Amino acid sequence: MAYDSVSVDAMGQMLETIQGDVEYDEWKRVDVEGKKKMKVVKITKNATDFKNYMLLEYAEFRDHVGRVKSQYAAFHELKDTLPDGHIIIQMDFAENFTCSSMDEIQSAYWNPTNVTLHPVVVYYKADKLDNKNFIYVSDVNQHNSTAVLTILKLMLPELKTTFPYATYVHYWTDSSSSQYRNRYMFDVILKHTSCLGLRHFGIILSVATGKAPVMD
């Protein structure tokens, strides 16, 4: 609503009404017992500094929302106009899942095992746009490009069996540089046909939403 109805200039005019010091809460990384942790801290700025700070933050916020809107519009357009032989793979790491055992002993409760969850939604055209859901579970908890490549090597042979007509794959991910946006994954894209057997058209989102794909 703010993006649609309040421009940066309008926000500046609203901020001109502020007088005196302003106290507000902000998430900041601070030292807690020798470790850096995110905490809510109280900050006080005079009116001028607060106005300048808010204008910078609001401009960045508008840029962020604008990118999100553009990306969602592009994604929906791709789904609406998906060519024959093309599939879309939307994927992201979810929060690790904590395993528990039935009737576990007390020491097991305090030492749980975590597993990695990597949901994938594949969109394809049949008579109409449809989707197929996958989730990859691993006891390896490193969320990095090696894990992504391993998942692709497991997933694409199955997709070629499920969708034998597929010739192109479109990837939609977030922009995590440790997972999808790095030199290792760009090398995979360059060698995609020879390594993974499908031509590609890679799309990497520039705004990380922090959420895994929604499975219908």
Image: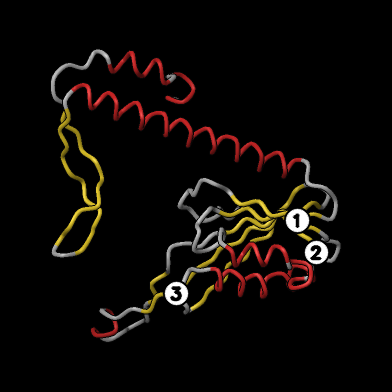
The amino acid beneath tag 3 is: Asn
Circle 3: element type: loop
**Residue 188, image x and y in percent?**
67, 67
Left or right of residue 113, residue 128 in this image: right
CA–CA distance in space, label 3 to label 1: 28 Å
| Sequence-earlier tag: 3 or 2 | 3
Q: In front: 191, or 71? A: 191
**Mark 3 vs 1: CB contact within 8 A:** no
Residue drawn at point x = 29 percent, y = 30 percent: 53
Q: Please name the residue shown 53% across and 32% down the image.
A: 66
Viewer-nearest of discs 3 and 2: 3
Q: What residue type is labelled 1?
A: Ile
- For disc 2, the neighbor class at 10 Å (few under 14, some 14 to 19, many from 20) is some
> Quick one: SS at disc 1?
strand
Nearer to us: label 1 or label 2: 1
Residue 123 falls left or right of residue 72: right
Q: Position of residue 124 (x, y in %)?
A: 76, 54
Q: What residue type is labelled 2?
A: Phe
Quarter residue 55 falls in: top left
Marking on residue 60: none
**Residue 177 position in % (x across, y down):** 50, 59
Q: Which x, y percent locates residue 199?
A: 79, 61
- Please name the residue that numbered disc 2 is placed on: 163
Q: Residue 87 carries which label?
A: 1
Instruction: Tell me how far mark 1 sits from mark 2, CA to CA.
Output: 9 Å
User: Decide: marks 1, 2 in contact (CB < 8 A)?
Assistant: yes
Quadrant into which the N terminus falls: top left
- Around disc 3, counting alpha carbons within 10 Å, would you say few (fewer than 14), some (14 to 19), or many (20 or more)? few
Q: Name the residue under label 3.
A: 141
The residue located at (79%, 51%) in the rendering is 125
What distance separates the C-alpha of mark 3 from that of mark 2?
Answer: 30 Å
